[in-house]
Image: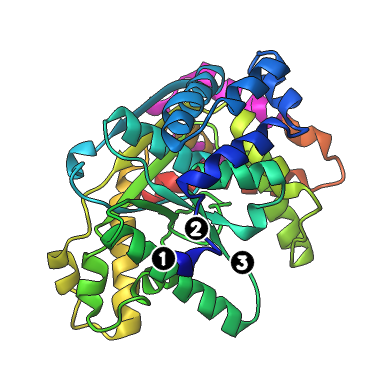
Amino acid sequence: MANFDDIRPFNADEIPAATQRMADSEVIPAIAQYFGVPAEAFRERIRSIKNLKEFQLGLLKEVIETLLEKTTTSFDWSGLENISEKKPYLFVSNHRDIVLDAMFLQYILNEAGQNTCQITFGSNLMCHPFVIDFGKVNKMFRTERGGTPKEFYNSMLHMSEYMRHVITEENESVWIAQRNGRTKDGNDATDPAIIKMFGMSRRDDKVVSLAELNIVPVAVSYEWESCDKLKTLELYLTRKNGHYEKKQGEDLNSILTGIMQPKGHVHFHTCPVVSEADLKALNDCPSGEFYKRVAELMDSRINPHFYLNPNNYIAHDLRSGTTTYADHYTAEQKEAFVKYMDWMNEYPDMDRKELEKIFLGIYANPVNNR
């Protein structure tokens, strides 16, 4: 493990010091207020944590359950029959929320009596000491962002080697998003470069290289899209200016917004593993085409299991100016969704029609992809 000290989560002997730092953080009062507990009591609760089990099965479980109670109307999952507690997996999901996609999956695995997974965590998101300590205690490992082409290549190889080490030698599962960054426009698509990265750590046989990772596609669905307003504004400004520059503290704001905003119904589905037989069927493809076809295979399992809520159908009909899916929602639900769009009135200098087009696309595109 020494070769991975620069990216790995905390070891067992590093956790007590990390929880002490977390307890002393200046952000504790705000967090405690959100969860309705006295700040000093919350600090003492964190200070009492000495190991991973106490953190994940104790404090974090309580926090997630409180979060679900405060921000969701229902939370459910399906497809666990497709995985076994006897195997480690590489879970690859569509990516809608910065931290909750992976944390909710960890919660589901724990509830099912399975081991929790390690989680990729972008270096750009390590924007505060509390976030860094929280992540590394919670089995998150660092994913480098940016750098020169050579630096980026080396960091991808390093991460690929680490993930293979965790799965094949440590017998522990890993979660990673299907693409670099969250889905902004509602179109979930696996990046072939991600699949190619998986194979960088073993090049002798591309089929065996991927097969031994036990890749499991995971479909993540939120009734109310995480950070939908922020994503709409980012896409609007990107299209208007040709680029988008993040402001200082924006990543942390997105993390907190995603955690605290209402989510409605949340659903996870674990799809069948990408088997050696699946991969052998693509083995005659040239290397680049092979990874593209594997990515398409992932999408063919994730997209049909994206749980479509009334919001998705309403947005599709509003965008198309039809009532094609009117039997999937009520007049009251449509009225509430249209009313929700009044947030755009806060931006009178922006093109309202363009904002609506982008916003509706976030919710409508999963219907098309289905």
Residue at mark 1: 162
The residue identified by callout 2 is 8
3 vs 2, front mark: 2
Hey, what amino acid is under mark 3?
Answer: Arg
Counting labels gives 3
> Quick check: is 328 in the magenta stretch?
yes
Give the answer, above or below, for where 132 lies relative to 40.
below
Residue 148 horizontal side relative to residue 310, left or right: right
User: x%, y% of residue 79?
Assistant: 24, 38
Q: Residue at point 65% right, 27% down?
A: 340
Residue in the picture at 36% in, 75% down: 201
Of pointers 3 and 2, the one earlier in the residue sequence: 2
- Asked if 243 appears above or below 229 in the picture, the reply is below
Amino acid on which disc 2 is placed: Arg
Residue 261 is situated, as x and y percent measured from the top left of the image, at 62, 29
Disc nearer the start of the sequence (1/3):
3
Element marked by disc 3: loop
Q: CA distance from mark 3 to mark 2?
A: 16 Å
Q: Which residue is mark 3?
A: 145
| Vertical position of residue 299 compared to residue 370: above or below | below
Q: Please give the name of the residue rendered at 64% of the width and 41% of the height, measured from the top-left corner.
A: 255
Side (left or right) of 128 relative to 140: right
Image quadrant assignment for residue 33: top right
Give coordinates of residue 125: x percent, y percent. 65, 52
Earlier residue among tags 2 and 1: 2
For the residues bearing labels 3 and 2, Cβ distance under 8 angstroms:
no
- 193 in the magenta segment: no
Quick one: 108 or 140, which is closer to the camera? Answer: 140
Q: Quadrant of residue 41?
A: top right
Q: CA distance from mark 2 to mark 1?
A: 8 Å
